[in-house]
Amino acid sequence: MNDIDGISLIYPNPSRGIANIEIQANSKSLVDITIYNLRGQTIRRMKASEISKGRSTIVWNGKTDDGRAVAKGIYFCKINSGNYALTKKMIVVE
């Protein structure tokens, strides 16, 4: 069994920049979150976070690694935990 059940929800989606990423975990887990643009370029890499069993929420502030607000468009949120990875689409409207 995987430690992570997956992303329960990304909201709001579409967002105006700030998005909440809910993750459901079977046990305490270490997760990495990476945000990509449509070209597959990494725009934000959030450092590893330890989450508790159950539902946890991680907030993405809608900014790149160097602190710039992202442009409106389609992005992908990838969560890695051990050998498990899950990707979800997000839309930024402003």
Image (cartoon, rainbow, N blue to C red):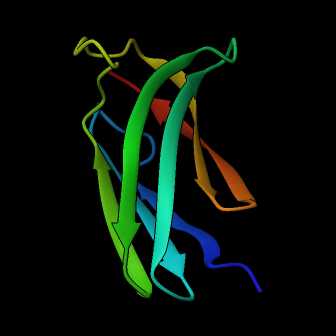
Query: In the image, what residue occupies the spot 64% across and 48% down?
Result: 88
- Above or below for 16 versus 84: above
- Above or below for 74 versus 34: above
Q: Quadrant of the N terminus?
A: bottom right
- Above or below for 91 versus 10: above
Q: Quadrant of the C terminus?
A: top left
Residue 83 occupies which quadrant of the picture? bottom right
Query: Would residue 4 be found to the left or right of residue 18 on screen?
Result: right
| Place of residue 35 in the rendered image (x, y in percent of width and height, measured from the top left) | 51, 32
Query: In the image, what residue occupies the spot 41% across and 50% down?
Result: 48
| Place of residue 60 in the rendered image (x, y in percent of width and height, measured from the top left) | 31, 42
Query: In the image, what residue occupies the spot 37% across and 67% down?
Result: 50
Query: Would residue 24 be found to the left or right of residue 22 on screen?
Result: right
Pick whichever, 32 or 57, lies toward us: 32
Pick whichever, 90 or 83, lies toward us: 83
| Place of residue 45 in the rendered image (x, y in percent of width and height, measured from the top left) | 44, 31
Query: Would residue 59 be found to the left or right of residue 78 on screen?
Result: left
